[in-house]
Every structure is written in C-alpha cells, then in structure tokens.
Amino acid sequence: MKKLLVSLAVLCALAGCSNGAAAPAGSGEVTEADVVEVTEEAVEKEPVEHVDEIDLTSMSPTMLFAEVVNMTRTPKQYEGATVTLRGGLMILMIDESTGVGSYSCYVEDATKCCQRGIGFTIDRPLEDTSILVEGNEVIIRGTFEIYEAGGHNFVRIADCDIWPV
C-alpha cells in the first residue's frame, strides 16, 4: 500500500500542470493569463450557490490558484460578484496617456510551476499610470463577468480599481 501511495505521489509530481498552463518560473511567459475562454456548458450550467463578493488577497497560494481555476470552470457561480485579487500584472492593450485598457492579473500555484490569470479592464482614466508596469504585483477590485467575443465565451473582472502592492 505504501509503495502505491509513493508511486501515485511521484506520478502527480511528474504530471505537473495541465492544459498548457505551465510556464517556467521566472521565464516571464504567462500562459492563459490574457484571455480565458470558458465552455458553453460552463456558461449555461446553473450554479449550486452564488458568490456575491470574494476577497482572494488573503488566501494561501494553493487556495488562491484553485479558486481562480474554479472561477474559469464555473463562471456562473461568480457572475456579478465583486472580486478582489492580488497578482502579477500583464498588459494586453492600453492607452498609455489615460491608463484605460485591458489587462490580466495572474497568480501562481504554491510550487510556482503553473500560472493562471483572469483578464480585467480599467474603464476610466487613472490618476497615476506609473503602476501599469508589466510584471508589477497589483491588487484589483471589480465585477466578475462573462462576455462573448467572436462567438466564444470569456471571463474577466470589469471596471476595476487598481493599487500597487
């Protein structure tokens, strides 16, 4: 029995991240952090319970990563919720004069082998655009939404406030 458990543990460790979400630590490459597509089935499935507000800033790395993955797998559960998230900043599109644009906030799992992100938008000019530096750690707060683009469903945190860490 002990050999079986050890074998399973080794197999899990070797399996690592799935779905192409892995990026070497410190490589600067963030995968699946810019736009997260969700399945039609996930969008249509009614949630067992709905979340109105969630603060992810005080969670352990393991719980944080799991919750972000869960947000992409069961998005209806979080739709309309106020989400506060701490993570790395990835710039997707920006008007540098105002700070208005689309971004991604990515988190790493506890082993720092996998990253997952959720896109977010800032829909108004920022007073201080100096925090908009790729890779900076930030805290964002906005409304979780499911949206459609090009015939596909995606999730993001809309109309965010943003603070440096």
Image (spheres, grey):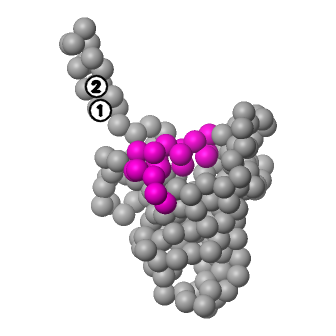
Horizontal and vertical percent position of residue 10 = 25, 26
Residue with the most extreme left position: 3
Secondary structure mostly seen in the magenta stretch: helix
Horizontal and vertical percent position of residue 118 = 57, 57
Horizontal and vertical percent position of residue 92 = 57, 69
Q: Is residue 3 left or right of residue 17?
A: left
Q: Is residue 72 magenta?
A: yes
Q: At numbered mark 1, what does the secondary structure look like: helix, strand or loop? A: helix
- Tags 1 and 2 in contact by the CB under 8 Å rule? yes
Identity of the residue drawn at 34% across and 32% down: 15
Q: Is residue 93 left or right of residue 158?
A: left
Question: Looking at the image, can residue 33 be seen?
Answer: no
Identity of the residue drawn at 29% across and 32% down: 14
Question: Pointer 2: residues within 10 angstroms few (<14), some, or many (20+)?
Answer: few
Q: Is residue 30 left or right of residue 45?
A: left
Taking depth in this image into account, of 34 and 130 the one nearest to the observer is: 130
Identity of the residue drawn at 60% across and 79% down: 94
Q: Amino acid at mark 1?
A: Ala
Question: Looking at the image, can residue 133 be seen?
Answer: yes
Q: Is residue 65 magenta?
A: yes
Q: Amino acid at mark 2?
A: Ala
Question: Looking at the image, is 20 positioned above or below residue 56?
Answer: above
Q: At numbered mark 2, what does the secondary structure look like: helix, strand or loop? A: helix
Quarter of the picture containing the C terminus is: bottom left
Identity of the residue drawn at 25% across and 8% down: 1
Q: Which residue is mark 1?
A: 13
Q: Which residues are magenta?
A: 57-73
Q: Which residue is mark 2?
A: 9
Horizontal and vertical percent position of residue 124 = 70, 82
